Image: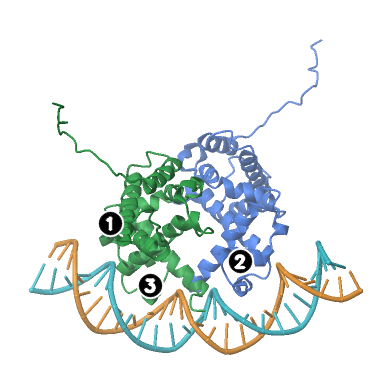
Chain colours: A blue, B green, C cyan, D orange
Amino acid sequence: MSDFLDKRIQRSKAALKQTCLDLLAEKPFEEITISEIVRKANYNRGTFYAHFHTKEELIDEIIDDTLGEMIRQIRHPYQTIHKVNMKDLNTEEITLFSYFQEQAPLYKLLLSSHIRADFRYRMAKAIEQLFIAEYDYEFSSATELDPKWLYIFRAHGIAGLVIRWIEEDFPESPEYMAKQIVELMLTSTEVFYVKNKHVPKKP
Amino acid sequence: MSDFLDKRIQRSKAALKQTCLDLLAEKPFEEITISEIVRKANYNRGTFYAHFHTKEELIDEIIDDTLGEMIRQIRHPYQTIHKVNMKDLNTEEITLFSYFQEQAPLYKLLLSSHIRADFRYRMAKAIEQLFIAEYDYEFSSATELDPKWLYIFRAHGIAGLVIRWIEEDFPESPEYMAKQIVELMLTSTEVFYVKNKHVPKKP
DNA sequence: AGTAGATTGTACGTTAATATACAGTCGGGA
DNA sequence: TCCCGACTGTATATTAACGTACAATCTACT
């Protein structure tokens, strides 16, 4: 078993990560030093270097942890079932949005200017990879659409949507957002109109 | 330097103590097992035995820590001055009561039925020992009072008062209580009346 | 009465975290 | 300009915490 982790390692890494987040709430990432982190966390500096080479590596792992948990939340409604019919999906099973609300301070932090890392893109990328790895679409009609682009499109669409929802301080309820997501998955627009064009008058 | 403590020791003991308090909020002390504490704290059972022989020893150290901090709060107004005149004392310097309010959950727990230890008595005893060790009264007039009894009397009086204040959920403000304490120290009652006796009528 | 499961106390070899030291870099103040 | 203090990166011996194991006790269940 290689994914087994000594309790000391679990603790040390978790404490250093949490302390880094605490400091990040006060000041930008660039102003935080490794010495400062270990001092506040009450760890030896050597312990930091035993697990991370740089503080960038630390923040990367924080982001990976966070996005990993987000992915688990997205998976939640489909844990048991194999064939998912969006129209029948119980939106109460979609826990993603209330998860974001619970973790609002964390996500606000990772989206803030205190951290330069491209968190927005990484979130979209994580969702994209989940879709590609675990989900398979069944297209109702003959189409030449490469699923790849559907995955990318939807992943980045969802990421953009939830980030906006977070940044606007959750203007709608999680339940509302869950229903919106389902609707978005179900919506295809065969016809659309170009605005501000004159309808040709009949002769 | 014998009071120097390895960071690992600090962490392990602190974590085990805090976890014990967390469990104590849920269930009585007798129902808590050592295995349960280390399991929840995510420590090895051997680590517990490296620092404590029994869970009674653990709770004893929690109480000692707590009362130690309480003593520090009582000391606070007299940190710098040598000769204290109660009448001139700035009651804002008395931090004890707001400290209790901040630590209300902890003290409620230690006073609760979930722990059989005689916390009330130990609190009084701690105050008593502080008085004996660090304070010296100056008696204004000739008296045969043995200071020992004054110390005991006042220590247990103060303990009783603050415990009642905590148990009644802080019915008065910390500022009010601070002033009351000063008044109590200044009050001597030379004369008193026995109730429900008839005043002898003049002839 | 018997047995399965959990807790306790103790032991031991292994490993992560410790204190400590040293050389190098950097920025600010005299 | 030099110096001082702080941070970095690396190294090493020591030690606390680790996983693991075993025998003993206790409780609950049937």
- The quarter of the image holding the C terminus of chain A is top right
Q: Which corner quadrant of the image does residue A194 belong to?
A: top right
**Which residue is the site of mark 2?**
A39
Of B32 and B140, the residue lying toward us: B140
Q: Chain of mark 1?
A: B
Where is residue B78? Give x, y as percent.
49, 57
Where is residue B133? Give x, y as percent.
40, 66
Secondary structure beneath disc 3?
helix
Of A53 and D1, the residue lying toward us: D1
**Which residue is the site of mark 1?**
B28
What type is the residue that disc 3 sits on? Phe
What type is the residue that disc 2 sits on? Arg
Where is residue B27? Give x, y as percent.
29, 55
- Residue at 15% across, 27% down: B201
Q: Chain of mark 2?
A: A
**Count of numbered badges drawn on the protein:** 3
Q: Are marks 3 and 1 on the same chain?
A: yes
Q: State if disc 2 and disc 1 touch (CB < 8 Å).
A: no
In the image, is B112 to the left or to the right of A120?
left
Q: Is residue A5 visible?
A: no
Q: Earlier in the sequence, mark 3 or mark 1?
A: 1
In the image, is A5 to the left or to the right of A112?
left
Secondary structure beneath disc 1?
loop
Marks 1/2: CA distance?
A: 36 Å
Q: Which corner quadrant of the image does residue A133 belong to?
A: bottom right
Q: Which corner quadrant of the image does residue B59 belong to?
A: bottom left
Q: Chain of mark 3?
A: B
Marks 3/1: CA distance?
A: 20 Å
- Determine whether B188 is above or below B139 in the image: above
**Which residue is the site of mark 3?**
B48
- Residue at 51% across, 75% down: B4
